Image: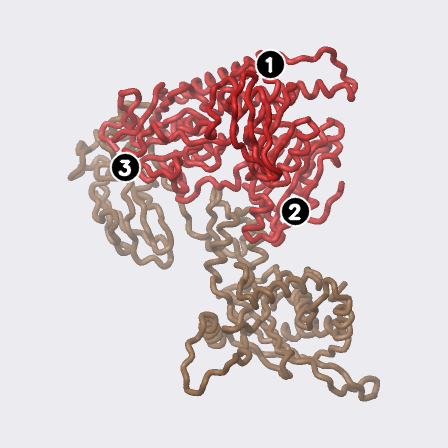
Chain colours: A brown, B red
């Protein structure tokens, strides 16, 4: 009995498939598991295997045309069954002959000479092109260790918080190489992630009632911030931090010049945030539908105002880089931000964001999370204020920080623990330089 | 291409590109023929890599013996029979050619001797027509020369003539300080000739990391070889004792007297006699234009090796041949061609020179923030013990990811050491991985690990 060959569902989202090429032609014998056609789906080019054996009797969808999932694209005649058309009409004899000539003696280019040539060279395996498989990304998660990847690809993926299980490898044997990781990163975040707070007023101010076209950066910001506030259930937690010791340390280090030249409170807070995140890693994470992805790298984006909006250059490894290295990184990023010439990965791979408005008279504020991160820290100005110490009222320096968290994966107690660590580090800041 | 295809693939040229491609094709089940107008092995086997390495090995042996006295190895009356050196080199080349012929037989590859030319549906060989579904152009290159330097085989030679000429000249001017120029400089100088190398660029070995050329010039100076960099050949005047060569440098023109002039100014593709124009195969400055999978502008026609440039290396041609054939057979994904930054370059004078990947200047130009680790062989136990302390290993890494961008070596045996660096690059190992690899002690290979340590700021023996 003839068997219908239907367009299979080759990916979750596939609705139709396009026949790129028939590798079997009417009259060809087909064994179970043999590749009979190449199909283009919404995700990739795939191979279509035969689930039954027999002789290809009829092709219903020609090369270059599409068919919906489930539609009959070809008809297979069972072994021994007569075939309506095609050269091998002789039933069982055809099958026997085909078997002797080894599977698929026809090259897809199907030069009439090729089949004859194969016959002439009997006993020798005929030229049979195979198709390079381009598998879909493996869907499993957290299996990074079992993924085949080069050491360099692993290092970049780890640093940028990329799950290798989501990357398709093109190296030998499907190995993930640097190129693949870079392609995946480019796909993930080609545009710089937008920051989480209103821009400093731009000069000159637009006249009332005028319509100002948004810059490309501003448009991205608008879209991302809208999405963030709509989708992410934010909650906020604040803490007041005594900055007297941190201020003394900063002044002392800045006086050393050299590698600490240009040291700012932002650098000091970056280092403290980096260390605090290693102690409360849940805030250095992303929500991903049914999983919480904990990032190993601690890369902190710093919301930075530029002429046409806001960018978030990324300071890498704030946990393990020494303070001087953070200063160096941040200075380089700031220089590139001012010249508007970022390097390709200056703006990607952040796992947490810092927004500091301390240079302006902002005592405290709450920032909007920069997806797919789970938290952002808003830093207010350091103010002189009377504080009570040993029963005496003395002048002190205080700074209010507010962390905004994604409540889908972070609960209030984690935010509290993070603030406790951050407060401890800034109030006893020697750990920041040790 | 044709209804009556005699072969799935016809390869034009049996050099290191063509013969390796043919064997790979046969392995994949393609009915394959090779057309060669000279003999199997190409320039590499007959007039390049292999015979020159035979002579270089003899030169190195002679140099070791000459320098033996300070190590307590005494030899009297040490001389060279240069005609025998050349004869042995030819014997090696002959064996190499026979070896390739044997491989054709073993893999049932048809071998046609004659000049092949593209025709519709295949290739014509001396009037006979072979039908083929695919054609692979692998005709290679020949030695270039400059105006006024007409090759006569007596006074003015290229490497081709020099490899056959059994007489050792008393003095030689070598025009060109690239791979061929420095190898012959070493050969002639070791066997006693007065040698001057004239190079246009500011360092020897232009195109490679400048530190290598500078170090080689220092080693050559110790060997008594005159190196004129930043100098351009201007004219040549033949006379009964040889030739007078005029050279222009930064400090004006000067004349050099020499019994022999060796022209080593590069190679030109052999693309004129293949019928490329009629077939519609696009070329640029004589080189055939190909895509990453080595396809030419005409469907079914592929090209590899020196014919497509710009690498002009035997092993690059072989690797490209495999890419081309696997593409024909549907076994190679689109765009998965040969990455030139993974192709090692080796030069076999003493000290040897070898490199893979980006040199320091290229790496900077590509915007990498670099770490550079250099380790001199003189700090290595094995180098001191074996008396080969010239040179160094230089590792260039990307500061951000520790990626190995390039490895550059000069010293004894580095043409073999570079294989480890090539493997590291292909596997995308980081400098940390090289450091984590235990290297046997004492070996010259320790220098690579030491250089990687230096790049990471963790140098031990320097």
Where residue B168 sits: x, y (%)? 59, 16
Viewer-closest of A256 and A312: A256
Q: Residue at x 66, y 62 (%)?
A: A328
Q: Residue at x 56, y 15 (%)?
A: B86
| Residue A86 visible in this rendered orientation of the protein | yes
Whole-Å distance between the Cαs marked 1 and 2? 43 Å
- Residue placed under numbered mark 1 in the picture: B82
Q: Earlier in the sequence, mark 1 or mark 2?
A: 1
Viewer-closest of B198 and B304: B198
- Residue placed under numbered mark 2 in the picture: B372
Q: Residue at x 53, y 19 (%)?
A: B239
Instruction: Give the letter of the chain under mark 3.
Output: A
Answer left or right for A59 relative to B303: left
A330 is higher (above) or lower (below) than B274? below
Crowd class of label 3 (few under 14; some 14 to 19; many from 20; radius 10 Å):
few
Image marks 1 and 3: residues in contact by CB distance under 8 Å: no
Instruction: Give the letter of the chain under mark 2.
Output: B
Front of the two marks 1 and 2: 1
Residue A109 circle label: 3
Q: Quadrant of residue A363?
A: bottom right
């Amino acid at each position: 009995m003839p068997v219908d060959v239907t367009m299979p569902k080759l990916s979750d989202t596939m609705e139709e498939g396009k026949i790129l090429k028939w590798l079997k032609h009417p009259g060809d014998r087909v064994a179970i598991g043999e590749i009979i056609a190449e199909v283009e789906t919404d995700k990739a080019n795939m191979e279509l295997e035969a689930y039954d054996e027999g002789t290809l009797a009829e092709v219903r969808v020609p090369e270059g045309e599409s068919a919906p999932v489930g539609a009959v694209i070809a008809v297979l005649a069972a072994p021994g069954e007569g075939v309506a058309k095609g050269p091998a009409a002789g039933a069982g004899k055809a099958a026997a002959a085909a078997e002797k000539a080894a599977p698929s003696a026809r090259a897809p280019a199907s030069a009439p000479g090729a089949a004859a040539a194969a016959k002439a060279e009997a006993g020798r395996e005929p030229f049979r092109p195979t198709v390079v498989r381009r598998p879909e990304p493996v869907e499993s998660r957290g299996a990074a260790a079992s993924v085949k990847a080069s050491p360099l690809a692993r290092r970049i993926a780890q640093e940028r918080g990329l799950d290798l299980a989501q990357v398709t490898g093109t190296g030998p044997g499907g190995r993930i190489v640097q190129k693949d990781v870079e392609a995946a990163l480019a796909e993930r975040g080609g545009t710089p992630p937008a920051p989480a707070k209103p821009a400093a007023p731009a000069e000159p101010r637009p006249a009332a009632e005028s319509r100002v076209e948004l810059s490309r950066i501003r448009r991205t910001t608008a879209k991302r911030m809208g999405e963030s506030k709509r989708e992410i259930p934010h909650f906020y937690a604040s803490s007041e931090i005594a900055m007297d010791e941190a201020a003394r340390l900063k002044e002392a280090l800045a006086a050393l010049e050299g590698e600490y030249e240009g040291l700012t409170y932002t650098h000091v807070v970056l280092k403290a945030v980096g260390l605090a995140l290693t102690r409360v890693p849940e805030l250095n994470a992303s929500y991903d539908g049914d999983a919480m992805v904990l990032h190993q790298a601690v890369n902190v984006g710093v919301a930075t105002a530029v002429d046409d909006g806001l960018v978030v250059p990324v300071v890498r490894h704030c946990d393990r880089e020494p303070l001087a290295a953070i200063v160096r990184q941040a200075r380089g990023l700031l220089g590139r931000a001012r010249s508007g010439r970022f390097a390709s990965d200056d703006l990607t791979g952040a796992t947490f964001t810092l927004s500091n408005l301390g240079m302006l008279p902002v005592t405290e504020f709450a920032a909007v999370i920069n997806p797919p991160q789970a938290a952002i820290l808003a830093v207010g100005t350091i103010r002189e204020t009377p504080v009570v110490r040993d029963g005496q009222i003395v002048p002190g320096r205080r700074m209010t920080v507010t962390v905004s968290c994604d409540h889908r994966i972070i609960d209030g107690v984690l935010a509290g623990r993070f603030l406790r660590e951050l407060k401890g580090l800034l109030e006893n800041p020697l750990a920041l330089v040790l | 291409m044709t209804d009556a295809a005699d072969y799935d693939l016809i390869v034009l040229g049996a050099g290191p590109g063509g013969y390796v491609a043919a064997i790979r094709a046969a392995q994949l089940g393609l009915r394959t023929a090779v057309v060669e107008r000279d003999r199997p092995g190409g320039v590499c086997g007959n007039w390049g890599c292999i015979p020159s390495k035979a002579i270089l090995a003899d030169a190195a042996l002679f140099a070791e013996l000459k320098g033996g006295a300070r190590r307590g190895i005494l030899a009297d009356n040490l001389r060279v029979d240069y005609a025998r050196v050349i004869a042995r080199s030819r014997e090696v080349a002959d064996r190499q050619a026979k070896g390739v012929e044997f491989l054709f037989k073993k893999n049932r590859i048809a071998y046609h001797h004659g000049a092949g030319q593209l025709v519709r549906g295949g290739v014509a060989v001396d009037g006979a027509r072979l039908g083929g579904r695919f054609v692979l152009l692998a005709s290679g290159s020949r030695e270039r020369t400059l105006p006024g330097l007409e090759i006569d085989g007596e006074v003015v030679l290229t490497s081709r003539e020099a490899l056959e000429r059994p007489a050792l000249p008393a003095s030689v001017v070598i025009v060109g300080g690239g791979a061929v120029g420095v190898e012959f400089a070493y050969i002639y100088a070791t066997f006693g000739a007065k040698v001057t190398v004239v190079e246009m660029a500011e360092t020897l070995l232009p195109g490679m990391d400048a530190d290598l050329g500078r170090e080689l010039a220092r080693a050559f100076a110790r060997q008594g070889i005159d190196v004129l960099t930043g100098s351009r050949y201007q004219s040549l005047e033949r006379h009964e004792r040889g030739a007078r060569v005029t050279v222009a440098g930064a400090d004006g023109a000067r004349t050099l007297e020499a019994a022999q002039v060796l022209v080593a100014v590069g190679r030109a593709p052999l693309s004129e006699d293949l019928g490329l124009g009629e077939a519609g195969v696009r070329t640029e400055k004589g080189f055939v234009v190909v895509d990453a999978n080595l396809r030419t502008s005409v469907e079914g026609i592929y090209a590899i090796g020196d014919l497509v440039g710009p690498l002009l290396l035997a092993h690059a041609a072989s690797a490209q041949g495999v890419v081309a054939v696997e593409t024909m057979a549907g076994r190679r994904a689109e765009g998965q061609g040969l990455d030139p930054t993974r192709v090692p370059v080796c030069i076999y004078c003493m000290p040897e020179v070898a490199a893979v990947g980006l040199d320091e200047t290229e790496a900077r130009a590509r915007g990498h923030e670099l770490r550079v680790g250099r380790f001199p062989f003189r700090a290595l136990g094995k180098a001191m013990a074996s008396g080969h302390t010239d040179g160094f290993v230089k590792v260039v890494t990307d500061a951000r990811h520790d990626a190995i961008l390039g490895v550059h070596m000069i010293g004894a045996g580095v043409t073999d050491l570079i294989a480890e660096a090539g493997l590291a690059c292909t596997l995308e190992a980081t400098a940390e991985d090289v450091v984590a690899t235990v290297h046997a002690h004492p070996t010259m290979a320790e220098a690579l690990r030491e250089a990687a340590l230096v790049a990471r700021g963790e140098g031990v023996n320097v």
